[in-house]
Image (cartoon, rainbow, N blue to C red):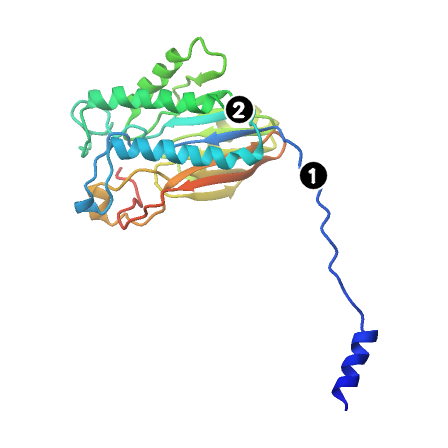
């Protein structure tokens, strides 16, 4: 006798409320570039699953690189056709740097094949990778050369690709051999470096010193680095640095040190011509076993 009439009263006279709809303009195709860096790929590394819990070989590495690249490109399609694809190579793309199967600094490594096989098949894979991307947009190859595993291999890779595509208009190569390479796209200045020297927090100061004019002329300043085998983003002092993850499996050294569990994968960053980095897409390695890398040997 009380509740029902009161409820009827509320239904008849109570105020109704509908949240205002968010008005969204139809998105237009933006002018943007894409940055893809398969850093710390470690071509030629060998890992036995029975010892590390995570098998890795040239066969596994190639399948992983091409399948994840395909996924990344498919996910980039929603952004439309990019103006340029910046492909960062080097940065421990190769696992060793000499015929003795050691790194640039002399640390012996477990290898899948000889140095000759690593060079031949690694360069062929590099061409295959560039060729697959140039069907989408012009490719700018940037070699991150100051790496601790493959400093000389990265130089060979750089000049091999420069010679291979010397007659191609849609592929260019940054042949700078300094520790850090720079590119600009629209309102964004980009730094590419391996990460085995200057710490992430010091990179803004280094960029400002090495590129003072460009620093002032660009509103957005970003850096791409690797070496640590795990993902991290650090924004400071007018610059954002993206530490990229690795696709490589875990060798005995990493497993024994306990550097395990870090997610693996490949990421791409979308750089708008005016607004800088406006998004990213990723393709993780799905077979995530307890032997994933979590650190860098040297």
Residue in the foreground of this view, choosing between 247 and 244:
247
* Residue 55 spot, x, y in % from top left: 23, 41
Comes first in the chain, label 1 or label 2: 1
Residue at image point 49% right, 26% down:
85
Q: Give the residue pinned by disc 1.
A: 26
Residue 40 visible in the displayed image: no
> Which mark is on residue 75?
none
Label 1 neighbour load within 10 Å: few <14, some 14-19, many 20+: few
Q: Give the residue pinned by disc 2.
A: 84
Placement of 1 over or under 200, stated as above or below? below
Residue at image point 80% right, 73% down:
14
Q: Residue furthest right?
A: 13
Mark 1 secondary-structure assignment: loop
Quadrant assignment, res 203: top left
For this view, does 140 lie left or right of residue 100?
right
Mark 2 secondary-structure assignment: strand
CA gap between label 1 and label 2 equals 24 Å
* Residue 65 spot, x, y in % from top left: 35, 33
Q: Residue furthest top?
A: 167
Residue in the foreground of this view, choosing between 60 and 97:
60
* Residue 142 spot, x, y in % from top left: 43, 23
For this view, does 44 lie left or right of residue 264?
left
């Amino acid at each position: 006798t009380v509740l029902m009439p009161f409820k009827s009263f509320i239904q008849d006279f109570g105020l109704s409320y509908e949240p205002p709809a968010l008005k969204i303009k139809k998105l237009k195709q933006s002018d943007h570039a894409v940055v893809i860096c398969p850093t710390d790929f470690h071509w030629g590394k060998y890992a036995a699953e029975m010892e590390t819990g995570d098998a890795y070989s040239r066969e596994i590495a190639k399948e992983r690189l091409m399948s994840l690249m395909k996924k990344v490109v498919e996910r980039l399609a929603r952004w439309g056709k990019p103006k340029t694809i910046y492909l960062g190579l080097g940065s421990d793309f190769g696992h060793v740097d000499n015929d003795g199967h050691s790194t640039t600094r002399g640390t012996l490594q477990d290898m899948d094949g000889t140095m000759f096989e690593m060079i031949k098949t690694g360069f062929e894979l590099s061409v295959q990778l560039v060729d697959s991307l140039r069907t989408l947009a012009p490719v700018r190859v940037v070699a991150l050369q100051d790496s601790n595993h493959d400093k000389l291999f990265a130089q060979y890779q750089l000049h091999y690709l420069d010679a291979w595509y010397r007659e191609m208009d849609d592929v260019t190569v940054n042949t700078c051999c300094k520790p850090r390479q720079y590119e600009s796209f629209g309102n964004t200045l980009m730094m590419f470096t391996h990460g085995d020297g200057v710490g992430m927090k010091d990179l803004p100061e280094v960029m400002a010193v090495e590129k003072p004019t460009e620093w002032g002329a660009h509103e957005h300043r970003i850096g791409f680095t690797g070496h640590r085998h795990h993902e991290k983003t650090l924004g400071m002092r007018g610059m954002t640095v993206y530490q990229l993850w690795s696709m490589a499996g875990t060798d005995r050294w990493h497993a024994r040190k306990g550097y395990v569990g870090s997610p693996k994968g490949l990421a791409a960053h979308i750089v708008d011509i005016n607004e800088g980095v406006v998004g990213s897409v990723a393709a993780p390695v799905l077979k995530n076993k307890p032997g994933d890398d979590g650190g860098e040997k040297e």
